Amino acid sequence: TSDQNINDCFAQVKEHCGKIDFLVHSIANAPLEDIRCPTLNTSRKGFLQAMETSVYSFIAVAREAAKIMNPGGSILTMSYFGGEKVVAGYNLMGVAKAALESSIKYLAFDLGPQNIRVNGISAGAIKTLAASAVGDFGDMLGMSSAIAPLQRNTSTIEVGNTALYLLSNLSSGTTGEIIHVDCGYHMMGSPGRALETWKLRPRDTISNK
């Protein structure tokens, strides 16, 4: 959240490394009380903090990185499906991720003339320290694995492999993309096989009162 710190960081990178080939942006933050409350009750302060840390930081570091990045370089950030669709419990972070994903596309346009690519990874639910801030995360993991076509949750290795692809020359023609690494969860328009797993039929949830 400090322009001076960002500028100092890239000045040091330039001094020690000269040019760079890629940048990975992987940070998001908001006050816990603003994540765990309904979006309707988000405070102004919490909203601004989430946007500054989770979205503007991406723009700020991309701007400085581009100044010392080789042609053909790649910038990558991390997102989540809650930025596209409503995921119960994700709340304010979903709003921030939506803004982040829009930023990916606009930065890809801005940096295209420098032959710098900008992409994002929308990873599936993974048990991390950061994820513990999301309400009912255990339920989210169970639901993801039950609904996803591959019938499991994503691993950190799979996300890392996709990152390597996007940062390498293998993806030289790809920019402005958000690649889902979520075992197919994002494409589902129904619970899929989850109903079989949970031994539940839709009509069982209908009250006959």
Image (cartoon, rainbow, N blue to C red):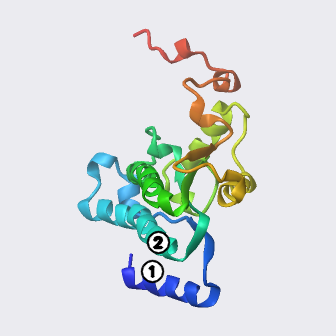
Q: Which mark is residue 61?
A: 2
Residue of label 1: 6
Total numbered labels placed on residues in the image: 2
Residue 80, compared with residue 71, is above or below; it is above
Number of residues whose C-alpha sits closer than 10 Å to that of mark 1, classed few (under 14), some (14–19) or many (20 or more) = some
Say whether disc 2 or disc 1 marks the residue closer to the N-terminus. Answer: 1
Residue 73, compared with residue 97, is above or below; it is below
Residue pictured at 42% horizontal, 58% vertical: 110
Residue pictured at 45% horizontal, 50% vertical: 105
- Which is nearer the eye, 98 or 176? 176
Number of residues whose C-alpha sits closer than 10 Å to that of mark 2, classed few (under 14), some (14–19) or many (20 or more) = some
- On the question of residue 77 being in view, the answer is no
- On the question of residue 176 being in view, the answer is yes
Residue pictured at 70% horizontal, 60% vertical: 168
Q: Is residue 139 left or right of residue 98?
A: right
From the top left corner, tell me how far across and down residue 29 is, in percent: 44, 65
Which SS class for mark 1? helix
Q: Which mark is residue 156?
A: none
